[in-house]
Amino acid sequence: MRRTSRSVLPGFGLSLGITCTYLSLMVLLPLATVFTRSADLSWADFWGTISNPRVVASYRVTFGASFVAALVNTVFGLLVAWVLVRYRFPGRRIVDAMVDLPFALPTAVAGIALTTLYTPNGWVGQYLEPFGIKVSYTWLGITVALVFIGLPFVVRTVQPVLDDLEVEVEEAAASLGARRSQTFLRVVLPTVAPALLTGFALAFARAIGEYGSVVFISGNMPMKTEIVPLLIITKLEQYDYAGATAVALVMLLVSFVLLLTINLLQWAARRRVEA
Amino acid sequence: MATVAVPRPATTAPRAITRATGESPAVRWTLTAIALAFLAFTLVLPLVLVFHEALSKGIEAYLAAIREPDALSAAKLTLLIASIAVPINLVFGISAAWCIAKFEFRGKNLLITLIDLPFAVSPVISGMIFVLLFGMHGWFGGWLFDHDVKIIFAVPGMVLATTFITSPFIARELIPLMQEQGTEEEEAAIVLGAGGWQTFWRVTLPNIKWGLLYGLILCNARAMGEFGAVSVVSGHIRGETNTLPLHVEILYNEYAFAASFAVASVLTLLAFVTLALKTLVEWQQRRAEAEDTEDVPPAERIAA
């Protein structure tokens, strides 16, 4: 890493030095353990661990619930962002600030609150019970918790794009005879689509790793409502370090691919704006 | 920005224009109502429940639950961990933003991606990696055992895991801000004879103060509220390696619901303070930006 152009500003060596040293010791070295530890396993053992039925069931729970939650967030996130940007109503600023609550509220608090709300005699659960809908300790409960956690990601990604949307474009569509619904579907939606997709990916990425808010509401039944992060903890508690790292490696790779996709999406969106 | 329509001469039919780029009042109110109902259901209801449950056994039980020695030691540990993790990440964040925003070098994008990495890692894995490093069977486990140093299932491990999780917050906030501000002001200061540190304190810091504060607030909220990563490395020893979020879990699992929600309500208040400070900083930032763009008419500045 050599500077390609000279600068009069001092502190390049010092700041880059601190940054690289810190990242190496605090982030890269610890993360490397996941790779070296899994390398201790033979390929057959590794494959056996990550394709074990209980592990596969936990992927299904984690990825399934995360996907559904991210979809719900995409729909409602767009709606909330739209209402916050386009309409004026009393208390709008407070509502806008409240959207970030899931970022600020410790996940354990969200977890116990949601669980208590949705148990069969809880505030919400009692109205669902007569219909035979169980939320706490089921797959549905996991999704509810993940919706809570993921909402701000979609709203905060879509909001600035809606804010920047030129009114003229919509006026042009309208003056050319488009109905309001047509303008929305053909003009507004394609413009916010990249941001919406990024928001979806961010919410999904957060959801697959989420632990604190889910562990209370999920009931943690192996094969049914056991999420991957919990399975990793269970393996660690049984001192099955190799097994825990093998599953963690799968999750890390999925997360890295998602991170890469999100960066590419944002890069593409930025190019579009600049073009 | 009201109803999005641009002000027009009154001679053209105003109603037709508003309708062209906005929705009819019925649609508008329906959409607003659905959005608000959704937010009330997902965000507000859980909050109301926290305080309702916390006070369900009366104010005395509430106060007793948060004054109990285990709760107090958990609060102390939470503050201790945040007071170590946040300053470390402050130094890291400023260093990273300085070299990335003020200089050109190869591998910059890779560096930015690496800074973001902890955000992509599950909290549970973030705790696990430190067990793999310093745990009994970890890389340094044997050496640490021989020298009687305890990191895992002790406070140092919890500090490490929290520092890892919260490391991107400040850097991430400062990098785009400082990139946008460029290097001209600092260069002018240096050319006029100011030293490096002088330039940083007198020129850079005043420019980035709101962004820095914003990053600090978010970093602190996460450091105090982190659950998964800390849970893996803590060992759950009451009065010793228990933070407030872990204490909430222990009480809840012991069916001490009122006490659990009492402690949770303290963390909820912390979340409120975080949100309030964050909003305040956002307004300040917007005002500072507006002052920079004096040529924009005031009406549009408010709308922006």
Image (cartoon, coloured by chain):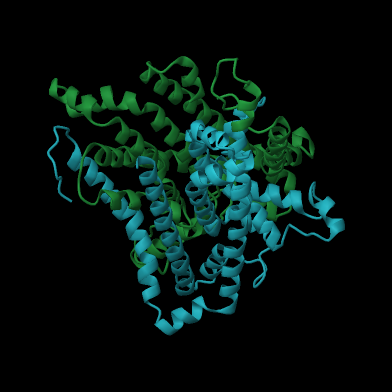
Chain colours: A cyan, B green
Image mark count? 0
Residue at (46, 20) in percent of width and height: B301
The answer to whether B158 is drawn above or below residue A233 in the figure is: above
Residue A96 in the image: x percent, y percent?
59, 33
- Asked which quadrant contains residue B13, the reply is top right
The answer to whether B195 is drawn above or below residue A4 in the figure is: above
User: A253 left or right of A146?
Assistant: left
- Asked which quadrant contains residue B295, the reply is top left
- Asked which quadrant contains residue B178, the reply is top left
Q: Is residue A65 visible?
A: yes
Q: Is residue B69 visible?
A: no
Q: Nearer the viewer, residue B146 or A138?
A: A138
The answer to whether B23 is drawn above or below residue A209 in the figure is: above
The answer to whether A274 is drawn above or below residue A65 in the figure is: above
Q: Nearer the viewer, residue B151 or A162?
A: A162
Picture quarter with the N terminus of chain B = top right
Residue B8 in the image: x percent, y percent?
55, 18
Q: In the displayed orientation, state which residue is furthest to the front.
A: A176
Q: Nearer the viewer, residue A91 or B224?
A: A91
User: B60 left or right of A164?
Assistant: right
User: A255 left or right of A233?
Assistant: left
Residue A147 in the image: x percent, y percent?
63, 51
Q: In the displayed orientation, state which residue is furthest to the right.
A: A130
Residue B83 in the image: x percent, y percent?
44, 38
Residue at (73, 57) in percent of width and height: A136
